[in-house]
Image (spheres, helix red, strand yellow):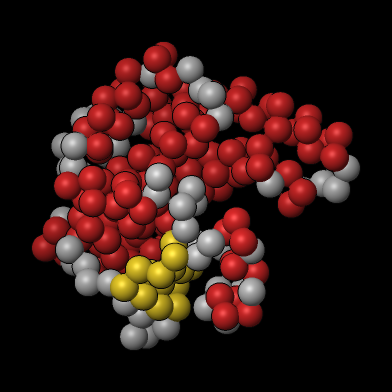
Amino acid sequence: MDFYYSKGSASYAVHILLEDAGQSYNQIHIDLSSGAQNERPYLEINPKGRVPSIVTEFGILTETPAILTYIAQLNPHKELLPTDPFLFAKGQSFNNYLSSTVHVAHAHKHRGSRWVDDRDAQALMAKKVQTNMTLCAELIEENLFTGPWVLGDQYTICDPYLALAYRWFEDDNVELSRFEKLKKHNLAMRKRASMQKILPFHS
């Protein structure tokens, strides 16, 4: 399996889970600052020009929630997915929220040009990010997080993804001292061997 990643991207969550799963992989860094994601060699892997991507013996997968689920399914003995159908769906719901809402809210800070060309409008969008990301943190803390892990006692594919979201909250100046559950989760994540192994590649 070839794993394409970059610093400061959503590939952080996948990198953690690859180590949690004990999955064999080759890691290939894509330098977003140089625009490597938009050059032909990488666009042939992922025409979206985004990371993460993985190349498997069956083909290429993109999109963080899909990749996380696939890695967990490849390694069922690691129990990274709930076996109960309802809990599995709750996990998918959580990860889809991070992907479709939290990530998009965060992207308004750095990627406003995806939505509007006017620079003044982009600046206004960026100004709103801290407020919107604080609301996302509140929703997760108060309604979506069970504890000690996202879905309860079982560590799952939701937890590396939340660790990534925590980074976004930090980057967007969310007042994290208000969110005890999120803080405890982040501390627990940082003690894990998987997190400690991949951190040098994402700092």
Q: Quadrant of residue 75?
A: bottom left
Q: Answer with left or right where residue 201 lies relative to residue 117.
A: left
The residue at the point 63 percent across, 79 percent down is 40
Establish if 136 lies above or below 95. Answer: above
Establish if 18 lies above or below 26. Answer: above
The residue at the point 88 percent across, 42 percent down is 118
Hey, which residue is sitting farthest top in the picture? 178
Can residue 38 be spotted in the picture?
yes
- Residue 31 lies, in percent from the top left, at 53, 61
Can residue 156 be spotted in the picture?
no
The residue at the point 29 percent across, 65 percent down is 71
Name the quarter where the C terminus is drawn: top left
- Residue 171 lies, in percent from the top left, at 52, 32
- Residue 34 lies, in percent from the top left, at 62, 61
Residue closest to the eye, 142 or 188: 188
Q: Answer with left or right where residue 33 lies relative to residue 185.
A: right
- Residue 82 lies, in percent from the top left, at 22, 52
Hey, which residue is sitting farthest bottom in the picture? 57
Q: Answer with left or right where residue 125 lies relative to residue 47.
A: right
Q: Quadrant of residue 64?
A: bottom left
